[in-house]
Amino acid sequence: SKAEMRHTCRGTINLATANITVEDSCNFIISNGGAQTYHLKASSEVERQRWVTALELAKAKAVKMLEESDDSGDESVSQTDKTELQSTLRTLSSKVEDLSTCNDLIAKHGTALQRSLSELETLRLPAESTEKIKQVNERATLFRITSNAMINACRDFLLLAQTHSKKWQKSLQHERDQRIRLEETLEQLAKQHNHLERAFRGATVLPASTPGTGGSAKDPCCPAKGDLSDEDDDNEFFDAPEIITMPESMGHKRTGSNISGTSSDISLDEQYKHQVEDTKKEKRTRIPYKPNYSLNLWSIMKNCIGKELSKIPMPVNFNEPLSMLQRLTEDLEYHELLDRAAKCESSLEQLCYVAAFTVSSYSTTVFRTSKPFNPLLGETFELDRLEENGYRSLCEQVSHHPPAAAHHADSKHGWTLRQEIKITSKFRGKYLSIMPLGTIHCVFHSSGNHYTWKKVTTTVHNIIVGKLWIDQSGEIEIVNHKTGDKCNLKFVPYSYFSRDVARKVTGEVTDPTGKVHFVLLGTWDEKMDCYKVTQGAGDNGAEGRQRAHEAEDSRVLLWKRNPLPKYAENMYYFSELALTLNAPESGTAPTDSRRRPDQRLMENGRWDEANAEKQRLEEKQRISRKRREAEAARATEDGKERD
């Protein structure tokens, strides 16, 4: 509606300030000079010119309206709506009056026609003519009755429209006022929360360091602290000292599709040679601290409700300096569970360790409320830990919309893991739902046992106001396709009124007949225990499971979360593995996530530059996609096959 236009709907280009440019005979571009650009294609040059002319005329009208309007806001919009409504009602009334006049004329002419026909009937005419005249008379009468019915229906419709339009207008205005009040309240709450956080940080952090020192001299990673209180709503920026010195130019050369390269001619080896760590040496345990750079989340997200998250252009302020491919690789943090599973002789025991492995992949999410970078199409991430841990892993982004990644890992300890994951997400206002689609496969070489499972839904709460927190909910069914054994895991959603332990996970391991052999119990952020079910004569399944819980001596600790590194809260709550994932390494592919310039800039605290670089890369990817689509269209026209 026009009222919403004042609130800038996402995707809107204001015609008054739009740039309309002709690209070629059939294509033209409408842009607002910023992030919003539409590329339009007409079927012919004539059609394109008609559109361009119509848009130019509309632009001139918009500019004129902008100059003529003295005051803006919802009140003037509301007044415009009322004026338009009254104008519509006046038009309807005049049309009904026209119909009424026509009805009178029809009635008048109909009466005259009937009179003439009656006179004809009195004349001495052949019997056949009299019959015809009688038929015409009857039809004229019927026509007049129908006309009267039509005009009465139109009059009733107008009366009904006038009555109900007032109610609709009142309801619409009420809803509009409610929405505006809600937006203002939420924005005010977000600002208050922001100020409270700053005040809290100021009260707890500032006294810890001597004024003027800008932080502790003992910790080279500690960022400089500034005055955390400010009266306006401007963004703050605190520089983080860089552990890894970055070159000024972030470009690199790449042959072929050159997804993330800039126009720079500096080679990759020259850029990164002073950063490269020998992969066999000790891994890094620190990254530059996260800068204290505040941003009003609600100001960005309020126009994105109901949208697909991957299609919302997000600044790096909400990211962490890792890509989604690196986050997928983090599933291997507790790889030793699969190493132990490979040594199990019993497939049921093996299934317990596989179940613990599936739960362990969520342990890193409990504090990680930031969004990983959405990988570029063709981006890869390779992790070689053959010497240290016995496994190696490779991920690739194989689709951009919808985002999809393929991941393959194998271990010299006798297992192979592969997964293809598509991420779908929806912003619902108060919370964000992330639904991973796709299947994970794990195969053990010696036994040939092949397990599959899917991931559960992740929900990020308090998007608008309050502290962000993450919950996992849903069920996972792990199936051994060789033996038919199954494990059902249930991730219990958090409830304020529940007495249960938070983040609880329960599970049962059953054989093909459905008999329960093991019961699993724990939390997805701390640990998982396993209890062996021993059923006596006459025991039913429920009693047997109850006995398993009581038999503490049968409890086996399958998995326990590793403690976070020191100062993890200042390093995006990264685990020890996560801290090493983005460290530059020699021999990586040009498409490796470690070489993404925007991600590297963000890691080093240069967020403004990272935002600009991220926008450039995304625009380059859009142009590349358009070129591929055009080539595919040309190939189709020529009758050639093209991938």
Image: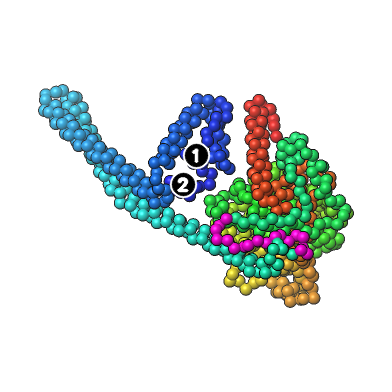
Q: Say how many tags the image has.
A: 2
| Figure quadrant of residue 349 | bottom right
Q: Is 513 displayed left or right of 198 in the figure?
A: right
Q: Which residue is drawn at the image coordinates 66% and 25% (left, top)?
A: 638
Question: In terms of secondary structure, where does tag 1 sit?
Answer: helix
Q: Which residue is drawn at the image coordinates 45% and 58% (left, top)?
A: 181
Q: Position of residue 141 (x, y in %)?
A: 20, 35
Q: Is 79 displayed left or right of 555 in the figure?
A: left
Label 2 amino acid?
Met
Q: Position of residue 129 (x, y in %)?
A: 18, 24
Q: In terms of depth relative to the viewer, which is nearer, 120 or 446?
A: 446
Region rendered in magenta? 217-234
* Location of mark 1 (residue): 17
Compared to residue 322, the image places residue 628 above or below, namely: above
Question: In terms of secondary structure, where does tag 2 sit?
Answer: helix
Q: Position of residue 187 (x, y in %)?
A: 52, 58
Q: Which residue is drawn at the image coordinates 50% and 47% (left, top)?
A: 9
* Location of mark 2 (residue): 5
Q: In terms of depth relative to the viewer, which is nearer, 233 or 580?
A: 233
